[in-house]
Image: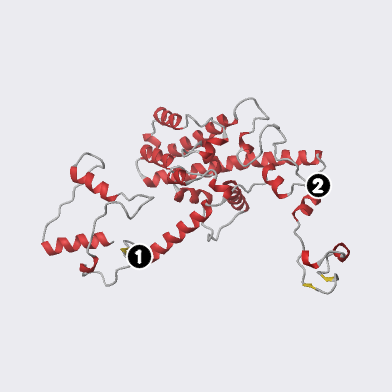
Amino acid sequence: MILTYAAQQIIQDLGVQISLFKVKAHSGVKFNEIADRLAQVSITSPFQDPRISINSSALNQIKTIPMWNGLVLDYSIKTVIKKFNSEIWRQKWLRQNRIRWWIHTNKAKNINWDMTWKTVHPSKISSLISSSNEASIRRFSLKLLNDELPTLSNLNKWNPSLYTTDICPFCQLEIENNIHVFTCSSQTDINPLIELKSKFIQIIIHEMANILQQELNLDSLKKKLEIYTSDFELRNQHLMEFDQICFLDIIAGIVPNSLVTLSKDILGNNKDSHLVILRSMRKFKIHLFNLWKYRCDKVIIWEKSQNIKTKDKKVGRRRFPILSTVSHDTTELRVYDDLDIEQYKGIETSYI
């Protein structure tokens, strides 16, 4: 905004005539390269890189110039506040222990956060149209990304007296977490990631074919996707701790910048690229959701074999009751009517 006003005023004051020519990016043109360098702002130090200096007070078209910490804001105040709040909540989310072990600073730079959030919420929450399937997929996506699925790893944390181990009950080899659910090899000797990789490629090809139609070069498209997914069969979960995004991160719900770039190179524009990624990730999550439901059916059978009943699980989740009043002179307690007072007799009030 500020740059536009500054350019307009310079043109008006000098009375120059401007001719615009389209120049391909990074084409080796001297001034185009200079403009590219000036336009780039570092993520880690956005106010330390070379920037175009504008005397904003000399601009006579603007009545009010928004500023923050001595810097002129090149956006409206509303946009700036939204960006600030969005970044604040994203950083709070990233600093959770369950997130920070696999998404740290360097990896976060390689993630397309806008597309990632859109794949979690494919439709607006404010939409008047709702369905149980949509809600189920949304809930599954959020729990998968935040490691809140009721896997054995989490069940063991939440109710250790009932679930005494976090090891997968089917393969008996690894901890069953939100990734192992989809990579467990208990049913077959083949690496499950091979099947997931094939499904992922198949979905993307189908969505790109719907966009390209007559211009589709299937062999070239398959070759590019095979190169991009060449290491998608690696199943070691320690890969998630490194800077480079792996297929396990995509399973968790992350959309890497590299995938967005690849899609744009194939389709030629951002609009179609984003549409393909949103649709592809949506269908891929539906596939994962179906695998999750199949796993849940198996766990129910396993729980019955372990004599784990529904009422036992509910008891394990029950919290300590809230007491309305506590008398410091006697151990007699006044509690809610649905609680058994006998279990509290003899308990010192200082421990309550």
Q: Nearer the viewer, residue 217 or 188?
A: 188
**Residue placed at 20% from the left, 59% from the top?**
7
Disc 2 target residue: 309
Locate residue 68, reporting x and y percent: 35, 65
Locate residue 310, reporting x and y percent: 79, 49
- Amino acid type for the residue under numbered disc 1: Asn
Colour treatment of the image: secondary structure
Q: Is residue 121 visible?
A: no
Q: The N terminus lies in which quarter of the figure? A: bottom left
Image disc number at residue 69: 1
**In the figure, is residue 76 to the left or right of 343?**
left
Q: Quadrant of residue 13?
A: bottom left
Image disc number at residue 251: none
Asked which secondary structure carries label 2, the reply is loop
- Amino acid type for the residue under numbered disc 2: Lys
Q: Nearer the viewer, residue 221 or 63?
A: 63
Distance from Cα at disc 1 to Cα at disc 2 = 59 Å
Which mark lies nearer to you, 1 or 2?
1
Q: Identify whether 267 is placed above or below 8.
A: above
**Residue placed at 74% from the left, 46% from the top?**
160
Locate residue 122, reporting x and y percent: 51, 51
Asked which secondary structure carries label 1, the reply is loop
**Residue placed at 64% from the left, 47% from the top?**
149
In primary-sequence order, the first of circles 1 and 2 is 1
Tell me, yes or no, whether the two marked residues, 1 and 2, touch with CB atoms within 8 Å: no
